[in-house]
Amino acid sequence: MSVSELTGENLYRDPYPVYARLREESPVAFFEGTKEFLVTRFEDCRAVGSNDRVFGPSGSPDRPEARVMGMPNVLSMSGDEHQLLRAGIDDNLTQEAVRGYVEMLTRPVVEDYLARLKPRGAANLTADLFEPISVRCIGNVIGLTDTPNDTLVEWFHAMAAGLQNVSDDQAVWDRLDRALAEIETQLGALYERALARPDHTLMSHVMRGGLPEGQVRSLDEILPTMKVIILGGLQEPGHAAANACAGLLLNPDQAKVAAADPAEHALRAFDEGLRWIAPIGVTPRVAAEDVVVAGTTIPAGASVAIVMASANRDASRFDNPDRFDMFRKKRPHLSFGFRPHFCSGHALSRAMGQIALEEVFRQLPNLRLDDSRELQAKGWRFRGVTDVPATWDA
């Protein structure tokens, strides 16, 4: 495809037309903006993602992930060190564990926001509902119970912008650095509290998980991983729910079905939203040796981006892939990544999203798009519908 089309600006505004051309014409393409090979077809993404020997995690200090989160972090680790750290992260995030606390964690927060929102009759459901629910619930899981929602939202927006700052905009770096300074200060205080008294927060689990009794990881050891958790955890459930809600409202017939029986359809809609617009669109790897993928030679040491968002719209895998359809034949998508780095919070995200969508379509009568303004979305490494302009019968 034309090099002029593969730009950071085009990807940030709407990557899907770019991905479609890449899949057709150049399924493995080098992107100068981030100095990495973009892998865009479903089967190629799955093959690269499942071959951890050849395509291992990237720990390069030159990667944008290093600038934003720091290294090493859970995404850049492998082997025993990674397994031990994942033991701490995953301990309270298994499907069984999540079932035990997700109702008390999520539904009261959702109901509280909806009670305040319902009389208004109109809102941006992303900024006014789904993002605040997401950051409040995940912030509580991490242990950031006293951190205001607005602060948590600013953190992940600043970090996501930094990861996508292909144009090297200094204002974006300045915003990121302010957020990182706040994050490090608050995580430092949280670390000291959990050090003095172990608890059930995710911070406490990450400090001790996988280690012999009495041993604790240092703050410097876990800060990069906690930043990964903050970035992915705070935004992903909220943006996944917003994306699914947008998909439903763009298809009024499906929205009516969801509203008629929200408990029956909420999870199906949430999962389709994850496929339709992957909140986390890319996962980085590095080639351990020269390898040929889809006819393109990727040299040893090269950075590789598995573009899950593109794979999820591959017509060879999904019928009519650009359309949101919660009734489509169920086939696994790639939005949660690949083992051994499969998303730790997948069970919690899905359970939270199900509850949020269920209550929204139960409590907001005749929910529909507000024609007075346009639906807005942005991003490619991280993408979300930033404005779901909705109205309902107050």
Image (spheres, rainbow, N blue to C red):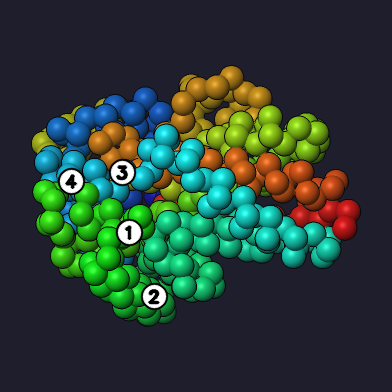
Q: Residue furthest right?
A: 393
Classify mark 2: residues with Cα within 10 Å, few (<14), some (14-19) or many (20+).
many
**Three-letter code for the amino acid on which mark 1 is drawn:** Asp
Classify mark 4: residues with Cα within 10 Å, few (<14), some (14-19) or many (20+).
many
Judge depth for marks 1 and 3 and give the one in front: 1
Residue 91 shows which numbered tag?
A: 3
Disc 4, disc 1: CB below 8 Å?
A: no
* Pick the front one: 68 or 294: 68
* Callout 2: SS: helix
Disc 3, disc 2: CB below 8 Å?
A: no
Q: Residue at x 61, y 31 (%)?
A: 268
Residue 251 spot, x, y in % from top left: 75, 37
In screen coordinates, is 370 left or right of 52? right
Q: Which residue is mark 4?
A: 210
Q: Name the quadrant of the C terminus.
A: bottom right
Q: Earlier in the sequence, mark 2 or mark 1?
A: 2
* Pick the front one: 229 or 139: 139
Q: Which residue is mark 1?
A: 199
Q: Name the quadrant of the N terminus.
A: top left
Q: Earlier in the sequence, mark 1 or mark 3?
A: 3
Mark pair 1, 3: CA separation: 13 Å
Q: Earlier in the sequence, mark 3 or mark 2?
A: 3
